[in-house]
Image (tube, coloured by chain):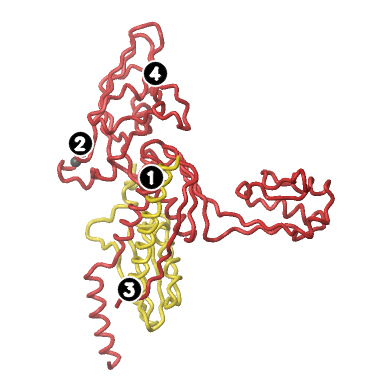
C-alpha cells in the first residue's frame, strides 16, 4: 500500500541534480561526487578506471543505503590533477573503451556470420 | 586541460552464436567492465512487455490479476524498444501512456465452444504493431526452446468459458520489473590458467594419476592413453572448486597443479528470452552503458560553481 514507486530507483526526481560535487574542506585535491539514481554498475567501473590514472591517490565509492538510490564517489588526486579532471577523464576513457568494444564486436559479428 | 588516456583496448571473440544464445570471450579489460555489461544486459536493456490489461470478459478458472500477470511475462519481440519512448517521458500522450510512440495495443478474444479443452496461448494475442508480437520459438530451429509451435500457454478453457481483453504493452527495464528483462541468463567466468608440475606429476603411478584426475568433479584433466601423461582437456570445465588441489595435498604432493584465474579474460554466456537477439543484447548493453556514462558527466553549472569556489579559495588563501 505504502510501497514506494518502483521507478524511484532510476528516475531522477524533478529539481534534483544528477551529479553534485563537493570539495573536501580539509584536504586539497579531494572531493566527493554524489550521483543520483545510479548503483554499482556505474560506480564500480568509474572507481576501477580511476585507479588506472596514476594521478589518482584514492578513488572509492559507497552505496550509502540500499533504499537511498544514490552513490558517492570520492576522489583524491595528486597536485598535477584534480578530482574533477580525473572524474571527467575516467568517463572519457570508459566511453572510448566501450566504443572500441562495440566496433570490435560488430567486426567479429560480421566475420562470424560470414564464416559459419 | 586534456590528460593522457588510460583507456583500454578490449578484444572480443565469438565462440557460438544463435538467435537466443551466445558465448564469447572478452579480453584485455577488467572485472568491473565485464560485470557492468552483465548487470546492464540483465536489468537495464529495455524491452516491451504488457503493462496494462483491461479485462472485458473472463469466465476462465484463473482470476483477472493472475491472467494479467501471466500476460506481462510473455516476451514480446522488442527490436523497437531502444528507439521507443518510456511512457513516463512521453509528451505525445498526456500521461496515460497509450499513444503510438510509447505503447502497443493487444487484443485477445477466445471462447471455447466444444467439449475439447481449449488452450489460450500467446498466439491468440493480436498486436496493433507487426514488429511487436509474442516471441515465436518455433520459427528458429536452432533455438534452445522446444519447437512445438503452440506458443506460450496462458490459460485453458472448457466449454462455455470465455476470455476477452485489451492489453497495453510498454517499454521498460528489468530494474523496474523482471518481465522487462531481455536476459534469461547472463554469466561470465574468469578464464582459468592451469599449470601442471610435470616433474611432480611423473612421480605418480598411473593408478595415482587416475585417482587424482577422477577427484575433479568436472572433467578438466585426462590421461593420454599413449604417453600416460596427465593433460588438461578442458580448462573451462574447472569450477574453481579446489578439489584437485586438496587431492594433491592429501596425496602428499602439494603444488602438483597450480590454477589461477586470469584477471583480464572472461568467458560470457548470454541467453536471451527472445525479446532481442543475443548479439543485439550485447550491442544494446554497450549503448545503454555509454548513455549512462554520458548522464553522469558533470554539468556546466557544477563546473562553473567550482571555478568560482576555486578563485574564492585561492583569494582566501592569499593567492
Ligand atoms: Zn505516449
The image quadrant where one finds the C terminus of chain A is top left
How far apart are the two marked residues, 1 and 2, measured between alpha carbons?
26 Å
Nearer the camera: disc 1 or disc 2: 1
| Label 1 or label 2, whichever comes before in sequence order | 2
- The residue under label 4 is B61
Instruction: Specify few, some or many for label 1: CA neighbours under 10 Å numbering under 14, 14-19, or 20 or more.
Output: many
- The residue under label 2 is B98
Q: Chain of mark 2?
A: B
Q: Examine the rendered structure and indicate whether residue A50 appears above or below residue A100.
A: below
Chain A appears in which tint? yellow
Q: Chain of mark 3?
A: A
**SS label for mark 2:** loop
Q: Which chain is red?
A: B
Nearer the camera: disc 4 or disc 1: 1
**SS label for mark 3:** strand
Pick the residue in front: B49 or B284: B284
**Number of the label disc, if any, that sits on residue B2:** none
CB within 8 Å, label 1 to label 3: no
Specify whether disc 4 shares its chain with disc 3.
no
| Label 2 or label 4, whichever comes before in sequence order | 4
Residue A83 is situated, as x and y percent measured from the top left of the image, at 36, 75
How far apart are the two marked residues, 3 and 2, measured between alpha carbons?
42 Å
Instruction: Tell me the residue at 38%/29% (across/down).
Output: B70
Pick the residue in front: B166 or B13: B13
Q: Chain of mark 4?
A: B
Specify whether disc 1 shares its chain with disc 3.
no
Name the quadrant where ligand 1 sits.
top left
Q: Examine the rendered structure and indicate whether residue B286 appears above or below residue B127.
A: below
Left or right of B268, for residue A101: left
Residue A24 is situated, as x and y percent measured from the top left of the image, at 36, 78
The image quadrant where one finds the N terminus of chain A is top left
CB within 8 Å, label 1 to label 2: no
Amino acid at each position: 500500500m505504502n510501497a514506494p514507486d518502483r521507478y524511484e530507483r532510476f528516475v531522477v526526481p524533478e529539481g534534483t541534480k544528477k551529479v553534485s560535487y563537493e570539495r573536501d574542506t580539509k584536504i586539497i585535491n579531494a572531493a566527493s561526487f554524489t550521483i543520483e539514481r545510479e548503483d554499482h554498475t556505474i560506480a564500480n567501473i568509474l572507481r576501477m578506471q580511476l585507479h588506472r590514472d596514476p594521478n589518482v591517490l584514492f578513488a572509492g565509492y559507497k552505496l550509502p543505503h540500499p533504499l537511498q538510490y544514490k552513490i558517492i564517489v570520492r576522489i583524491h588526486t595528486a597536485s598535477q590533477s584534480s578530482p574533477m579532471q580525473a572524474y571527467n577523464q575516467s568517463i572519457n576513457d570508459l566511453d572510448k573503451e566501450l566504443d572500441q568494444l562495440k566496433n570490435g564486436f560488430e567486426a567479429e559479428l560480421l566475420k562470424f556470420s560470414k564464416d559459419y | 586541460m586534456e590528460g593522457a588516456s588510460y583507456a583500454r583496448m578490449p578484444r572480443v571473440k565469438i565462440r557460438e552464436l544463435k538467435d537466443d544464445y551466445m558465448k564469447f570471450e572478452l579480453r584485455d579489460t577488467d572485472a568491473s567492465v565485464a560485470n557492468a555489461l552483465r548487470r546492464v544486459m540483465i536489468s537495464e536493456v529495455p524491452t516491451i512487455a504488457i503493462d496494462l490489461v483491461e479485462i472485458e470478459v473472463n469466465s476462465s478458472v484463473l482470476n483477472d490479476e493472475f491472467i494479467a500477470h501471466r500476460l506481462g511475462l510473455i516476451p514480446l519481440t522488442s527490436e523497437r524498444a531502444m528507439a521507443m519512448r518510456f511512457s513516463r517521458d512521453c509528451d505525445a500522450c498526456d500521461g496515460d501512456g497509450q499513444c503510438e510512440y510509447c505503447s502497443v495495443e493487444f487484443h485477445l478474444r477466445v471462447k471455447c465452444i466444444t467439449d475439447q479443452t481449449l488452450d489460450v496461448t500467446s498466439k491468440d494475442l493480436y498486436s496493433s504493431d507487426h514488429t511487436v508480437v509474442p516471441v515465436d520459438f518455433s520459427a528458429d530451429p536452432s533455438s534452445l526452446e522446444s519447437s512445438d509451435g503452440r506458443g506460450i500457454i496462458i490459460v485453458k478453457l472448457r466449454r462455455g468459458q470465455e476470455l476477452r481483453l485489451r492489453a497495453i504493452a510498454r517499454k521498460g527495464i528489468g530494474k523496474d520489473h523482471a518481465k522487462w528483462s531481455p536476459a534469461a541468463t547472463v554469466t561470465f567466468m574468469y578464464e582459468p590458467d592451469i599449470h601442471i608440475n610435470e616433474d611432480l606429476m611423473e612421480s605418480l603411478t598411473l593408478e595415482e594419476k587416475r585417482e587424482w584426475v577422477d577427484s575433479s568433479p568436472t572433467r578438466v584433466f585426462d590421461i593420454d592413453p599413449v604417453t600416460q601423461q596427465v593433460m588438461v582437456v578442458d580448462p573451462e570445465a574447472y569450477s574453481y572448486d579446489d578439489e584437485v588441489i586438496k587431492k594433491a595435498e592429501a596425496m602428499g604432493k602439494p603444488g602438483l597443479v597450480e590454477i589461477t584465474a586470469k584477471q583480464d579474460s572472461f568467458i560470457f554466456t548470454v541467453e536471451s528470452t527472445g525479446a532481442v537477439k543475443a548479439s543485439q543484447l550485447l550491442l544494446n548493453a554497450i549503448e545503454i552503458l555509454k548513455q549512462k556514462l554520458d548522464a553522469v558527466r558533470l554539468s556546466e553549472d557544477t563546473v562553473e560553481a567550482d571555478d568560482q569556489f576555486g578563485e574564492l579559495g585561492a583569494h582566501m588563501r592569499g593567492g
